[in-house]
Image (spheres, rainbow, N blue to C red):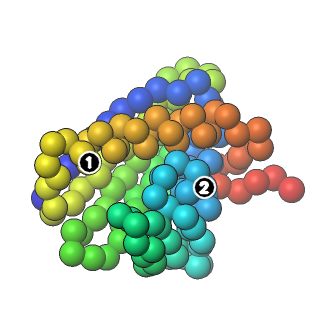
């Protein structure tokens, strides 16, 4: 199994960042291939994506630990794909996010590592640019 890891910092409160990331409906905002992600109850999430010009759908899982600001996710399939992310507060209004991906499939030329770094940059940008308030656990206040 191969593990890919990337850490980045963002000018956003740790709880706000985690709340944004813990809502699976936000996945298409920072995964360019993903077109839909809908919670199905419990930890189940229905996902849709465009991969190499082909529409694919599947079931994934997402486990959220609000107190620890930690997410774990995965999807069944031949690559045994799963990962986790951790959001830590560096100082008020400034966070550190560490994302790790695990797969039995090895990518050539560093494409998975590069994709991971681009995704982390996109998710921190999407979270900091969002003008909606997010709470831990991915709930938008009403």
Residue 97 lies, with reference to residue 30, above or below; the image says: above
Q: Is residue 87 left or right of residue 40?
A: left
- The residue positioned 36% from the left and 33% from the top of the image is 7
Q: Is residue 133 left or right of residue 85?
A: right
Could you give the CA–CA distance between mark 2 and mark 1, rounded to whole angstroms? 21 Å
Q: Which mark is residue 8?
A: none
Q: Position of residue 84 (x, y in %)?
A: 37, 52
Q: Quadrant of the C terminus?
A: bottom right
- The residue positioned 36% from the left and 37% from the top of the image is 117
Residue furthest out toward the right: 142
Residue 96 lies, with reference to residue 107, above or below; the image says: above
The answer to whether one can see residue 126 in this image is: yes
- The residue positioned 34% from the left and 44% from the top of the image is 116
Observer-nearest of 32 and 10? 32
Q: Residues within 10 Å of mark 2 (few under 14, many from 20)?
A: some
Sequence-wise first label, 2 or 1: 2
Q: Is residue 15 left or right of residue 62?
A: right
The residue that label 2 is drawn on is 26
The residue that label 1 is drawn on is 112
Q: Secondary structure at mark 2?
A: helix
């Amino acid at each position: 199994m191969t593990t890919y890891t990337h850490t980045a910092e963002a000018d956003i409160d740790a709880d706000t960042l985690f709340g944004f990331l813990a809502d699976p409906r936000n996945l298409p905002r920072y995964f360019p291939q993903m077109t839909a992600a809908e919670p199905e109850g419990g930890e189940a999430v229905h996902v849709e994506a465009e991969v190499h010009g082909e529409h694919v759908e599947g079931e994934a899982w997402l486990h959220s630990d609000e107190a620890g600001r930690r997410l774990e996710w995965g999807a069944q399939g031949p690559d045994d794909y799963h990962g986790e992310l951790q959001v830590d507060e560096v100082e008020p209004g400034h966070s550190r996010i560490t994302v790790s991906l695990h797969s039995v499939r090895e990518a050539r030329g560093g494409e998975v590592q590069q994709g991971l770094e681009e995704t982390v940059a996109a998710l921190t940008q999407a979270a900091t640019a969002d003008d909606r308030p997010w709470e831990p656990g991915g709930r938008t206040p009403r």
